[in-house]
Amino acid sequence: MLDIDPELVATALERSSDYRVLRRHHPRRLFEHPGDAEIRHGLLIDLETTGLDPNYHEVIEIGLVPFTYTVDGRLVAAEEPYGSFQQPWGPILPEITRLTGIDSAMVEGHMIERSRVEAMVERADLIVAHNASFDRPFAEDVCPALKNKPWGCSLQQVPWAAEGMGSKLSYIASDLGLIFSAHRAVDDCQATLECLSRPLPRSGRTGFSHLLEQAFLPVYRVKAVRAPYEAKDLLKARRYRWDDGSVSQTRCWFKDLPEDEVGLELEWLRREAYRYDANVPIIAIDPCDRFSARV
């Protein structure tokens, strides 16, 4: 059998538009030299759980990757990750094992070292997760100090669709030519950081620069209370989400916006959704509360 260098084969295939090459992601420690820029500390977090509801389901794996970044939006370096299984009180259902590869035998006897998590959180200026609205309620149960930190979301705060890309982490990685072990906590963190470090195909900016631009700004939740039922498809198309009222006590469609977009959104709601001059509630959300169950 010929001893063929796979990298030479991959490079040859990339020259043709008939082939697309995906490379295994190998986590790296260094991304970019900061120069004279001011440095901040970030912390990427990912959780695997027994289900979707933090009121009933439990964390079975945690992954944390500390990193440094510059205040002008450049990733500098990744630090030593921390990952741990945790044995839940209840069972791990077969569908969770099929999704994550984690079964009851793997987590038996394991517990998250909470003091280590707390030390990593204390140092961080910014917490980042891919789909922070899912991870944050579970994470705050593991480490309550996370309630006092600003959170960024690499799912919602990077314009993947505008760049012609998917938004699921495995799709983003594939669009950037990468494959990795999805649904394992540390691997997901490392892959997220790599994806955020890459220039995006249309803007040429990195995903992280987009995220950081929004992470410390307040947002405003526009709540389309009592919007007509027949407007639901319009609202969904405009990326409104449904609040069932279980936490807020108000059932409504809602959308989070920066301050400079609120006025135009109110005009659109009154013109297209309500079709009258409706009184639309607006709630300011602090960066330390964003993506939490508290709002």
Image (tube, rainbow, N blue to C red):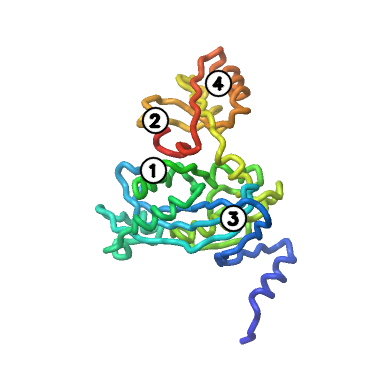
Residue 215 located left or right of residue 5: left
Closer to the camera in the image, 269 or 81:
81
Give the residue number, with chain letter if any, for mark 3: 195
What is the spatial separation of the Cα atoms under label 1 and label 2, in whole angstroms?
Answer: 17 Å
**Disc with the residue nearer the chain's start (1 vs 4):** 1
Give amino acid for label 4. Answer: Ala
Give the residue number, with chain letter if any, for mark 2: 244
User: Crowding at label 2, few (<14), some or many (≥20) Cα neighbours within 10 Å?
Assistant: few
Between circles 1 and 2, the one closer to the viewer is 1
In the rendered image, residue 78, in percent from the top left (x then y), is placed at 54, 60
Closer to the camera in the image, 238 or 115:
115
Give amino acid for label 2. Answer: Asp
State the image quarter where residue 267 is shown: top right
Give the residue number, with chain letter if any, for mark 1: 137
State the image quarter where residue 107 is shown: bottom left
Say which quadrant the C terminus sits in: top left
Say which element carries label 3: helix
Give amino acid for label 3. Answer: Cys
In the rendered image, residue 117, in percent from the top left (x then y), is placed at 39, 55
User: Crowding at label 3, few (<14), some or many (≥20) Cα neighbours within 10 Å?
Assistant: many
**Disc with the residue nearer the chain's start (2 vs 3):** 3
Say which element carries label 2: loop
- The disc at residue 273 is 4
Say which quadrant the N terminus sits in: bottom right
**Residue 25 makes an appearance in the image:** no
Q: Residue at x 69, y 75 (%)?
A: 8
Give amino acid for label 1. Answer: Pro
In the rendered image, residue 103, in percent from the top left (x then y), is placed at 33, 61
Labels 1 & 3 near each other (Cβ < 8 A): no
